Amino acid sequence: MEAAAATNMHPRTISIVVSSLILAIAGTATAGVLPDDRGDILYHLYDGGGITIDGPSILVRKKVGKSVSLVGNYYIDMISSASIDVITTASPYTEEREQMSLGMDYLRGNTTMSVSITNSEESDFTSDSYSFSVSQDMFGDLTTLTMAYSLGDDEVRRSDDDTFTRDADRQFYSIGLTQIVTRNLIMGLNVETITDEGFLNNPYRTVRYLDPGSPVGYSYEPELYPNTRTSTAVGFRARYHLPYRAALQGEYRFFTDTWGIISHTAAISYTHPWGPFTFTGKYRFYTQDQADFYSDLFSRSEATNFRGRDKELSEFVSQNFRLQASYELFKEWSYFERGSVNLIYDQLLIDYDNFRDLTSGAPVGQEPLYALDAGVYQLFFSFWF
């Protein structure tokens, strides 16, 4: 499950995406089955577009009896940003984010109920999330229905203004259906709706507008977003297991929201085992339209009721290439049942259709379009016990 705007690569967005992937690494409960006991130690590094993010994560999952599984995650990252957004309107900065998550899965018959709580802290941002989901196996365990709800409570601040405090609330609803079609084919359909309310823009970000009195031909003013947003996404996924233990997976996702953004995501991946190794290659393509109130250059100050110049609101196309290798370290060693080491590399390429590079020094409105090339590295060890 990927956010539609995850490819914008704002530092906070990158952190949230990476931390959600960390939780996915250790697996989540499915109806009728609790995840295995395991521990994960991870280090991740994102480097691209003038932004560097890195840090460790530790995750532990443990069963309590036959019906309960507990999971805890501690994650920290350091953000250093001199991105195009920063260097054109502000000074480079460093930031630290700390996140802690606790969760529990409860299994009763063919039904699994899961709850979790997550707290994320930065110097100018606090986020608390509370989640609940229930999964039910049906029709001889061939069909699984999953419903989920999450409530988020954010507090947005400014590091240069102690009096600035704004709130934002979000609610997430999801319903998914997974079907075992044949012995080798599994298919899934998922529908999500997210509602946001409150302060939804970045307190530091500005928009630019034409200003004949300025030496460069334009000036800046604070951005202004609507205080509500509702988004809906529909995703389809199919996984086919090949006779020689390999697997081929395809995905498609459609997204739309009340800000006028429409996006399409398509991905294909191939997994191949080879002795103690497992290799995976994945290609992901993403395209989106711009928000109704986005503009790279407004005609004048306060030209519209709402104004935004964030890259994630613009029209762009992104491609992601992933290579992943896993190696089985051992089986039945001391206290552990088995262990593995995993290395993941993602190459991210984004071409923006109407967001311009102001560092070029070209005349106003004639600056070259911005493009982003970034790499994401993840190294983690897993131990089952």
Image (cartoon, grey):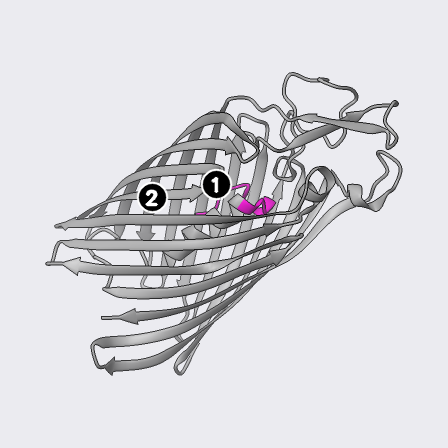
Residue occupying image coordinates x 49% and y 43%: 3
Three-letter amino acid code at the position of disc 1: Ser
Residue occupying image coordinates x 35% and y 54%: 74
Element type at mark 2? strand
Task: Please name whichever residue, 239 or 350, is drawn nearer the observer in this view of the structure.
Answer: 350
Three-letter amino acid code at the position of disc 2: Thr
Is the stretch drawn in magenta largely helix, strand or loop? loop
> Left or right of 1: which side holds 176?
left
> Left or right of 39: which side holds 155?
right
The percent position of residue 122, horizontal first and vertical second, equals 46, 43
Q: Please indicate, yes or no, whether residue 199 appears anywhere in the rendered image.
A: no
Q: Quadrant of residue 302?
A: top right
Residue ID for mark 2: 118
Residue occupying image coordinates x 59% and y 28%: 260
The percent position of residue 274, horizontal first and vertical second, equals 43, 80
Residue ID for mark 1: 123
In the image, the segment drawn in magenta is 1-11
Q: Is residue 9 magenta-colored?
A: yes
Is residue 150 placed above or below 277 in the rendered structure? above
Quadrant containing the C terminus is bottom left
For label 1, the crowd category at 10 Å Cα-Cα, with few meaning under 14, some 14 to 19 and many 20 or more, is few
Task: Please name whichever residue, 84 or 157, is drawn nearer the observer in this view of the structure.
Answer: 157
